[in-house]
Amino acid sequence: MSDDIETIAESLAFDLNDDDIADCRESADRLADIAAGVSDDSERTVERTGSLLEDEYGALLDGFETPRTRETGGPLADQRIVVKDNIAVEHLGLTCGSAGFEYVPGFDATVVERLLEAGGELLGKANMDAFAFGPTGEFSGRADVVNPIAADRVPGGSSSGSGVAVATGLADVALGTDTGGSVRIPAACCGVVGVKPTFGHVSTHGVVPFAPSLDTVGPLARSVETAADALSAISDERTADSFGQTSSPSESQAVAADSDETFTVGVVTEFLEECSETVTRGVRSLCGEVESASELELEEVSVDLGSIEDAYLLVGATEFAWYLRQRGLVRGNGSTYARRWSRALREFVDDDGFSDHVAKRVLPSATLDAETDGDSYVAGRLEAEAFGRRLEAAFDRVDVLLVPTLRTLPPERGDVSAHDRLFDVLGNTAPFNLTGNPAVTLPVDGADGLPISVQVVAPRHDDGVAIDCARVFEEIVAESASLEPPALPA
């Protein structure tokens, strides 16, 4: 035992004499006895009561025979809801979209509790890319997810089932998680609305992490209004922010009501320059319609993108590698502390359960992190902070930014891999995870029968401003004779 503690001391660069080592060993033994006596409700056996919800699009997984409800009234009354399968729902299997993993939680995630308290009808779980490693929606180990607008195009991920469930009418509201765009990307690919709230605005208790400093939970719906109702239901102004993006709730942090205010909208030149001609043309068509709207004023703005794409790879994948090394425990910021969960994940990892896609996404950053003793991760965070300062400078001139959600039309299946064309999908969404800004995506036009979507990005904690401005864009699109997003399935 003394050899073990000496090895640990050496790894921590502690230089102690033999007597000190012996004292520490004695203290550790005493703490071990205390830890063994701590009760853990997660240890109880939890019965899996759900059954597979089958649909032609592969959007749904485990669910209830009769929708689960708690309240008969509320802002989400009569709204059918599904949640992504990395969000805990008591008695339903939690697979994270992986073929070889399943855990049955004995509790609901905080966001699930709030949906039920708001009167929602919980149908069950939505499919996803395994362990949230999208971004195209092609990497579920449970079922192939099909884009209902165009089967030869990707549905977007990693919240693929959430986007498809809303687009097809299988659900009125779906929750997804967004670490680099995983709510906004499937919303854009499937032609629906998706909201990424300000980092820390929605509790992640009971949500399986990907990158804890980037992870958010947000709603998808067919309209901005319905998405706003869902966001209001799950929002938590009391949530502590552990990662330096200081939380200071304001009246606009919660979802604002309809506003008569005129918004100054900054069209970001650099983001448009990265987009295909087709997407750029769609955004410019939207801007042409906006010029006649009294509620919006357009202004071209410049924001140097720097190396923000590489910063996302250095931060996101590295944090997931840390999570794997700790076998499912994020010390100091655990989404939940449950021994059954930790054991289940440990067994899955030790049995080489991860797909090649996940491995290829994680390994380069994990290797660099080890080789540089963490300096590469720090570099990624510093680059994100610099980009955030440039965004703040832009917000000194405008109320919101207008950014295309995807750089291209939804890609054809098989065109995007772990290392090829990744940022065609992630490039315009991931930067705002690194900065923590809220962003609302909505469809504004179409081409070749496929949707073109934009993001309305607001300053941190101004979620209500993003929602209100998105409502105005939605009205402009609905009234326009020239803007034509593809129709959703009836």
Image (cartoon, rainbow, N blue to C red):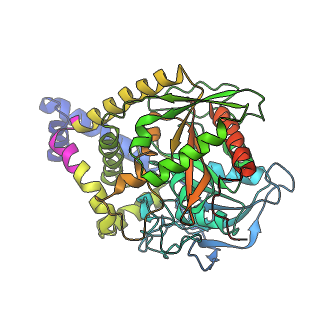
Instruction: Write the start and end of the magenta stretch as one range.
Output: 366-375
Total residue callouts: 0
Q: Is residue 392 above or below residue 214?
A: above
Q: Is residue 411 magenta?
A: no
Name which residue lies at 34% across and 38% down. Answer: 308
In the rendered structure, the answer to whether residue 183 lies left or right of residue 414 reads right
Name which residue lies at 44% across and 45% down. Answer: 428
Name which residue lies at 24% across and 49% down. Answer: 366
Image quadrant holding the C terminus, namely bottom right
Q: Which of 484 and 318 is in front in this view?
A: 484
In the rendered structure, the answer to whether residue 263 lies left or right of residue 84 reads right
Name which residue lies at 37% across and 30% down. Answer: 304
Q: Is residue 306 above or below residue 179?
A: above
Q: Which of 272 and 36 is in front in this view?
A: 272
Residue 445, visible in the rendered structure: yes
x and y, in percent, of residue 469 in the image: 67, 36
Q: Does the magenta stretch include residue 369?
A: yes
x and y, in percent, of residue 221 in the image: 68, 55
Q: Is residue 411 above or below residue 275?
A: below
x and y, in percent, of residue 255 in the image: 71, 36
